[in-house]
Image: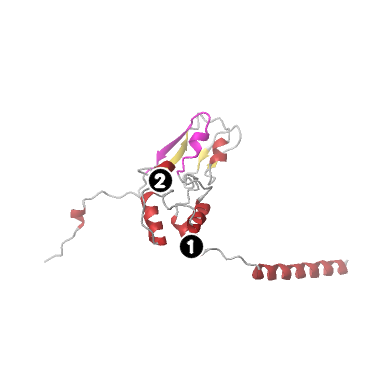
């Protein structure tokens, strides 16, 4: 019995050393430009750019296979950031890919109509919808990226894209800029 335990321990240690050596010897370095491009993208994983997510789109941009203007959720701000990062001129958003919403949206499921088909769960690229088969589903607001992929998947049309409700934490008072200038006291 003791011999078997020692043998298995030695075998596990030897295999651990081999795996440790292999992880160092055959380490694959990531492309830093891809990481930087991916950090600029909005991470909605919506696929509107024609790629299955933001990382594959970033890789295509880095290889020169895709333009920087294919991300409707990111809009003009993302295009400008990518242009600055890559030293290119900003170009207008590719309208064939969609348009940038004027305000951020999230999915809302009317739970009274939901039949629990799970098609919206399958369509959601970020797992922001929870529920079970033949049970109502709901959206986790903090996880929803507003990609707009779930409404077309719903057979009973119970999903709407609504503006993100304002909270006290993110509410900003609309004050004209002239009034923001404070003159020094004399």
Residue numbers of the magenta segment:
146-165
Work out whether residue 167 or residue 62 is closer to the camera in this orientation and state it: 62
Kindly tell me whether residue 142 is visible in this rendering. yes
Query: Which residue carries the number 2 mark?
Result: 94
- What is the quadrant of the C terminus in the image? bottom left
Which of label 2 and label 1 is nearer to you? 2
Q: Secondary structure at mark 2?
A: loop
Residue 109 drawn at (x, y percent): 48, 35
Instruction: Give yes or no for residue 160 being in the magenta stretch.
Output: yes
Please state if 19 lies on the left or on the right of 59 as rendered. right
Residue shown at 69%/68% (left/top)? 22
Residue 132 drawn at (x, y percent): 60, 37
Residue 120 drawn at (x, y percent): 54, 37
As drawn, the label of residue 33 is 1
Work out whether residue 100 or residue 166 is closer to the camera in this orientation and state it: 100
Residue shown at 53%/35% (left/top)? 153
- What is the quadrant of the N terminus in the image? bottom right
């Amino acid at each position: 019995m003791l011999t078997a335990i020692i043998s298995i321990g030695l075998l596990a240690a030897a295999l651990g050393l081999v795996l440790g050596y292999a992880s160092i010897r055959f380490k694959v370095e990531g492309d830093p430009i891809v990481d930087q491009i991916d950090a600029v993208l909005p991470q909605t994983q919506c696929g509107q750019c024609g790629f299955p997510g933001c990382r594959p789109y970033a890789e295509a941009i880095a290889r020169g296979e895709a333009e920087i203007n294919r991300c409707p959720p990111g809009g003009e701000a993302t295009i400008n950031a990518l242009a600055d990062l890559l030293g290119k001129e900003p170009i207008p958003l590719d309208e064939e890919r969609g348009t940038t919403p004027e305000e951020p949206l999230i999915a809302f499921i009317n739970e009274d109509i939901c039949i629990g088909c799970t098609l919206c769960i399958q369509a959601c690229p970020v797992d922001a919808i929870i529920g079970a088969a033949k049970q109502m589903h709901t959206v986790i607001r903090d996880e929803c990226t507003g990609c707009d992929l779930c409404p077309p998947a719903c057979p009973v049309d119970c999903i709407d894209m609504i503006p993100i409700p304002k909270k006290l934490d993110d509410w900003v008072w609309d004050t004209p800029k002239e009034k923001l200038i404070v003159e020094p006291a004399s």
